[in-house]
Image (cartoon, coloured by chain):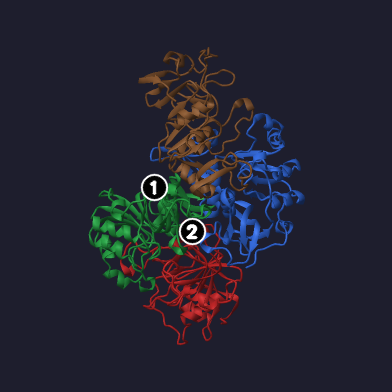
Chain colours: A red, B brown, C blue, D green
Amino acid sequence: MSKMSKVVVPEMPPLEREMIALRIANMLEDGSYVNLGIGIPTLVSNWIEGRDIIIQAEIGMLKCGPLADEGEQDQDRINASCQFVHEMPGCSYFNVETSFAMIRGGRMDVAVLGALQVSAKGDLAGWNNPARGLGKTGNIGGSMDLAVGAAKLIVAMEHFTPGGEPKILDVCNYPLTAKECVDVIVTNYALIEVTPKGLVLKEAIPGITAEDVQKMTAAKLIVADDFHEMEL
Amino acid sequence: MSKMSKVVVPEMPPLEREMIALRIANMLEDGSYVNLGIGIPTLVSNWIEGRDIIIQAEIGMLKCGPLADEGEQDQDRINASCQFVHEMPGCSYFNVETSFAMIRGGRMDVAVLGALQVSAKGDLAGWNNPARGLGKTGNIGGSMDLAVGAAKLIVAMEHFTPGGEPKILDVCNYPLTAKECVDVIVTNYALIEVTPKGLVLKEAIPGITAEDVQKMTAAKLIVADDFHEMEL
Amino acid sequence: MDKTYASVEEAIADIPDGATIAFGSFFTAGKPTALTKALAKKGVKDLTIVVQQVGTGNEEMLELVTNGQIKKAICNYPFPRSASKGAQHPFEQAVRNGKIKLEIYPIGTFVEKLRCAGAGIPGFYTPTGVGTVVGEGKEVRVFNGIECLLELALPVDYAFVHAWKGDREGNLVYRFTAQNYNNAMAMAGKVTIAEVETLVDAGELDPNFIHTPGIFVKRVVETGRPEFNSAAV
Amino acid sequence: MDKTYASVEEAIADIPDGATIAFGSFFTAGKPTALTKALAKKGVKDLTIVVQQVGTGNEEMLELVTNGQIKKAICNYPFPRSASKGAQHPFEQAVRNGKIKLEIYPIGTFVEKLRCAGAGIPGFYTPTGVGTVVGEGKEVRVFNGIECLLELALPVDYAFVHAWKGDREGNLVYRFTAQNYNNAMAMAGKVTIAEVETLVDAGELDPNFIHTPGIFVKRVVETGRPEFNSAAV
């Protein structure tokens, strides 16, 4: 199925990236430690203001706050995406070896990462797009450690590549970030859980049926007993 | 030779423990980082006042100063022997994992340790006296890490056990601290270097000949070309 | 995220028989005195304790020993320094007569095993202990011509740590050499419980100088400053 | 023990061709700007650099690249994030055309390799990278049912670090997220050279809050506070 060619995308407008982030924000529990990757995951932080969720920036910061506007920026206070940030009360700074001790050691309750591909078994491919032509090299950053170390790994991504290829596949054919690490996939069309039995379709956006999602997905989906419309 | 029984101790009075410590203090170079073990090694600190030698306390302290008298004591400022100490300007405190990163990582220019036995190859036995009857258990503390990690390991000890047995042997028969780790042995009679060729006798105290030292030592000694009287 | 507990009793209430517990302290410095006393009072048993030593100035731990609460100890300097004191010491006696099983490590290995448990590193190689009783039964491997032992991470169910200051979210600051094993143990603990001399609100500690970030700490209880005399030991 | 040097030029004077050098910084934060510029000026070549990345806001490192001073790079996020920017970037081009050899690691492995080099630990096991290109050719071993890779320590001849404050004996304090890799690199360096924004005498820094103890630092030079704009990158 991973050889499946371009699919016909339903006419329903998919979720905006901000809405994917909102769906994920609603999954986060108060009192949890969370690391947000680059891209859609970063947008999750826009939906948790005032909530008791602690954001880790892998550069070495806990209780990382919102982006800092001009005039409030400090060159020594940036997040792992090189953006100026605020600190929240109860913040701590530490070195990168301690930051990744936390990550690899299982202290992150949730990591939210982007992805290029996710397989039926929850393999994640996210760090190396072969189209860039860098071969076996590229920007790994903290993605492999987060994928392996986080208690729960949520993938936030669009359902298709910019070229219209499905990103959920039987088997990833891009270089892997980690094997069997993804717990939940939230796309602009659906919410899918990775279970020992396979990919379970839990939610689809309004106007999209389970059959629609299956057609858009190059791996077999099990429709959950409680499959329902995604609420935002 | 390690089965050799009690030897006749020469009539010359041996060095006091303080004098063994002085001989070692005179070997230390300014600008060096030094860790001093329990017993005679601790006395070395009495001879380096005003010198540019930095003492590490493996509990997690650099620039550990002299013992603190009553009225100047702080329950949170102790050395690795549980003694109250002063801090020197430029002091730093750190956790034990960092302390032993320094030690194992080779940042100690010199460690001075006591010993129960030293072998001809520089094996050190210092943590477990079988007479105590604790079998394979006992107080290891930081001795094994220091023996392995220090750039230079000086043993400070008396030449004989309290029972009159020689402590320098062909092969140690007490449980080892580390193999082939000792660089120099300073006793109350002599200064002996451990070299690839064997034990080299460099110095003896006034009134003691090289032959005397050999008689007191249950391993073969090579007399150094520049063998001379120990100066203090 | 308020991690504070009103009392040490409440903070340790869920500890079951058979738990593995690490205790901060290097001799008398940085001892979690209040938590350890509460553990003795609670009477939980078959414990495995992970602690530098029991022989010197550790009356709180001694109470666990004399109560018969300890099944096994993992230490690096377990006994009194003096052989004669040791022969009289309840912990050494319990080890000698087999009532407490003892496992020993060099300090560097001991503390790195704890840090690794907290860092998601299941094993590491160290040159320390090769050719000694510490190396018996362990894999030896040569790196750059130097023999090393494979040592494994040491996770613990609970860690008791003592801090000078702590905030409600678990950020900790230690004082001088009372820092010692407390950070590595906080990292190793599945449930780390901190007793702090002074509790402050989040935001009151300087974020640039936190010794143990709150993520490693599950529970915080304010216990005041214990007084003891190191020189007396 | 005064470790200060009057200038960055003097502090790096002995660095030979072929040296392996680690550079602190996470993107723009904590960059040893002055030391790196001096290295470019010195013109030493065939260098192996160990640094997070070269693609984003690292003009000083870029100068080493365009000067042809670099033989090999060890990174975790080497290139510009954007493919189109990357295609134009001299470092990415040099890697693509084989002029610079590149070795990559996940951040956690990268930084732990450096810490281990400074900690006398020649190798460690990590679950990160198993089943990926990072694991190719490396030993896989199972601990508690989890596959792990054996990774080796990464010692460096020199480490360039940037600190907020330093004293004459090499004790360092970093500021906020400018801390990042600087401590692990200081530990890994056979010769660690610190540029500090403000130099103070021994005793002026609070000994309870030193991020990198002076024992890891061989040379200190005061270079003032660099100004740069992270958002511009």
Decide if residue B101 is in sight here. yes
For mark 1, name the chain.
D
Give the percent coordinates (x, y) of residue C159: 63, 52
Q: In the image shown, does B181 or D91 lie closer to the viewer?
A: B181
Badge 2: how crowded within 10 Å, few (<14), some, or many (20+)? many
Name the residue type under label 2. Phe
Give the percent coordinates (x, y) of residue C92: 68, 35
Name the residue type under label 1. Asp
Badge 1: how crowded within 10 Å, few (<14), some, or many (20+)? some
- Judge from the rendering whether residue D204 lies leftward or rightward of residue D12; answer left or right: right
Residue at 57% of width from left, 53% of height from top? C183
Q: Which residue is mark 2?
A: A100
Q: Which residue is mark 1?
A: D2
Residue C210 found in image quarter: bottom right
Where is the N terminus of chain D found, in terms of image quarters? top left
Residue at 32% of width from left, 71% of height from top? D83
In this rendering, is residue B175 above or below D74? above
Residue at 64% of width from left, 56% of height from top? C194
- Judge from the rendering whether residue C204 lies leftward or rightward of residue D228; answer left or right: right
Q: Nearer the viewer, mark 2 or mark 1?
A: 1
Residue at 31% of width from left, 58% of height from top? D36
Where is the C terminus of chain D found, in terms of image quarters? bottom left
Decide if residue B156 is in sight here. no
Is disc 1 placed on a helix, strand or loop?
loop
Please give the label number shown on residue B189.
none
Q: CA distance from mark 2 to mark 1?
A: 34 Å
